[in-house]
Image: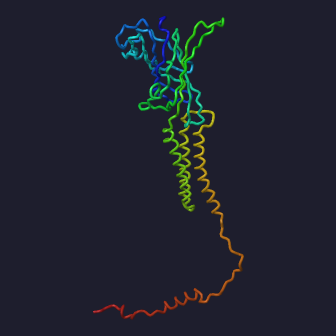
Amino acid sequence: MGPCKSAEFESCHATDLVSLGKKFEASFDLTLEWRDPRLAGMVQSTTPIPSTMLWTPALSFGKKVQVLTDGGASSEEEGVITAWVMPDGTIANKKRYDVKIKCAMDLKAYPVDNQQCSFQFHGLNGALLRLKPTFEWRSDVSLTTDITSVHSAFSVINVQISAFANSFLDEAGASPNTYTTIEMTLQMSRLRNYHLMEIYIPSITIVCLSWVAFWINRAAVPARVALGITTVLTMVTQSTRVVGMPQVSYVRAIDVWALSCQTFVFLALVEYALVNYLGGNQKPKLNTSQPYTVEPPDQPSNVFNNLKHSFRWRNRTVANPTDFAPIYS
């Protein structure tokens, strides 16, 4: 084990990033490389070999990481080779880890927020982890997100990786053991398509629908009241979708949005109630600025004309009575 004290961090592949409020789950493909001079020249080309037959660096994740599944052991049981030996004695070992990482997320701008989370893993038992001198993060190679087959709440926009050494101190203050640590910092941006389709577009539609009442005649009381109450209840129901999202003790951007939409819909209903109240109290007023005079009519009164017309109708002549006599043979 003496010559095998170095390992290189090559790549990390995040396949799933699911937000759980203050935590997020991720799956990583971690590839470690180290060189064992004793294996140099034993193979002519890169040869797969079971990792159980080789010494592998001992890794330990930091306090923020909870390992859910260790893909290395399960892959060996299923017959999947995860280690390869090269002609120069270099060994590459690839493992997949499903982890849950604690992250102090700031959700004040949720759901249009960007998060930065970091986690560590340590090399134990003499394994000295180091980065390649020419290491540079490339979004299309070193760390990628696969959101085509799984639901991912974030997209990775940048990754910062650093390596440093730590040591344990004994009672005398000495550091008999030294271990190396690799820290990975993920800068992630939340995907907004879900919230756009489920929260923003429906709420905008409901608010615009409540404004339709402004173009309805104020005399159509049932129509305007039904439209106002329906939009208010619909907006309240829409706001309940926020309950299932991460809960915090401070106000988030989505809370301000939901409250603003409810306010607009409620004010549209209050506006009609106010207009209807003020319009119902208005009474016609007489114009007393000029004297009111009554002039006698030029024509006879309507009552006299009606009586005259009735008298003439009663004295109309009718047809000859013989026209209505019965006919006898």
The residue positioned 37% from the left and 7% from the top of the image is 42
Q: Position of residue 130 (x, y in %)?
A: 52, 16
Q: Outermost residue, left direction? A: 329
Residue at 56% in and 57% down = 214
Question: Relative to 281, does residue 210 appear above or below in the rendering?
Answer: above
Q: Position of residue 14 (x, y in %)?
A: 47, 25
Task: Report the number of discs.
Answer: 0
The answer to whether 223 appears left or right of 171 in the picture is: left
Q: Which residue is depicted at the point 55% across and 56% down?
A: 213
In the rendering, at what x and y percent does residue 301 appear?
60, 87
Give the answer, above or below, for where 104 lies relative to 179: below
Q: Is residue 135 left or right of residue 82?
A: right
Q: Up-down: is 178 above or below 273?
A: above
Residue nearest the viewer, comparing 180 with 297? 180
| Closest to the observer, 314 or 50 | 50
Q: Quadrant of residue 75?
A: top left
270 or 127: nearer the viewer: 127
